[in-house]
């Protein structure tokens, strides 16, 4: 683990990004797009939301413009949920590539500015923030969505885990028996 505070924050931010993206690995584009909750939450939509969010927080907040704004769908407009799903014209591969480009753009901001650099978040009423605050906020937001993605992915094909190479779950577990045990406890209430 890096010792420098900015490097630590960047490492955790990248971990959140990587976790969110790998939850799409090996799935068909249909499975990546299919709504999995009553509010339409879907895996590819979370990636689209993440890329749009990072452009705002590491771009506009610190006075940097994304070079191709036509590639983005920011909050507002006719469809308030437009940054939460891929349109028929957007491909999964295209959105994943765009997210990698956005990450590089965000990392340029992080590299160029000190942690105490001041920015302003327009959709927070112009609130003054530091790069440090934005890095923490974005990491927390991405980890939250990575958790959502983990649950959605488990419902699709049973894949679980914190990291691609280490699931952090017991490998020799009788999951149906475990779930039955928990259900039996819940039924007592």
Image (cartoon, grey):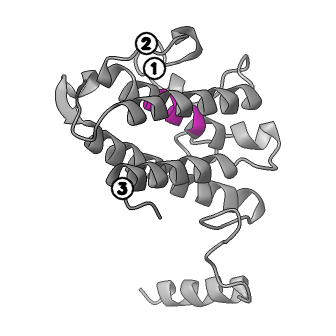
Q: Is residue 91 above or below residue 154?
A: above
Residues rendered magenta in the picture: 47-54
Q: Indicate which disc residue 17 carries.
A: none
Q: Residue 38: where, in percent of width, then height?
A: 55, 44
Label 2–label 1 contact, CB within 8 A? yes
Query: What is the distance, in whole Å, between disc 3 and disc 1 at their CAs?
Result: 33 Å
Q: Mark 2 = which residue?
A: 77
Q: Residue at x 71, y 47 (%)?
A: 24
Q: Nearer the viewer, mark 2 or mark 3?
A: 3
Secondary structure of the residue carrying numbered label 2 = loop
Mark 1 residue crowding within 10 angstroms, few (<14) / some (14–19) / many (20+): some
Q: Give whichever of 188, 114 is nearer the camera.
A: 114
Residue carrying label 1: 74
Question: Residue 4 shows which numbered tag?
Answer: 3
Q: Is residue 84 visible?
A: no
Q: Is residue 3 above or below residue 179?
A: above
Q: Position of residue 105 (x, y in %)?
A: 50, 27
Sooner in the amino-acid sequence: mark 2 or mark 3: 3
**Where is residue 9 drawn, in percent x and y?**
39, 52
- Helix, strand or loop at label 1? It is loop
> In terms of sequence position, does the residue under pointer 3 or pointer 1 come before the other?
3
Q: Nearer the viewer, residue 75 or 38?
A: 75
Q: Residue at x 35, y 19 (%)?
A: 60
Q: CA distance from mark 2 to mark 1?
A: 8 Å
């Amino acid at each position: 683990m890096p010792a420098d505070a900015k490097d630590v924050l960047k490492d955790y931010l990248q971990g959140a990004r990587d976790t969110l993206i790998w939850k799409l690995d090996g799935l068909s584009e249909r499975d990546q797009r299919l709504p999995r909750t009553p509010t339409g939450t879907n895996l590819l939509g979370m990636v689209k939301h993440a890329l749009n969010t990072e452009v705002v927080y590491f771009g506009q907040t610190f006075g940097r413009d994304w070079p191709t704004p036509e590639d983005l769908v920011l909050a507002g407009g006719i469809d308030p949920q437009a940054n939460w799903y891929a349109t028929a014209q957007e491909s999964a591969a295209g959105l994943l590539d765009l997210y990698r480009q956005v990450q590089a753009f965000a990392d340029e901001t992080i590299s160029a500015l000190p942690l105490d650099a001041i920015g302003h978040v327009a959709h927070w009423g112009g609130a003054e923030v530091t790069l440090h605050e934005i890095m923490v906020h974005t990491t927390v937001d991405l980890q939250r969505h990575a958790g959502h993605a983990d649950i959605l992915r488990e419902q699709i094909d049973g894949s679980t885990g914190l990291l691609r190479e280490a699931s952090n779950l017991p490998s020799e577990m009788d999951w149906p028996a475990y779930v039955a045990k928990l259900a039996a406890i819940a039924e007592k209430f």
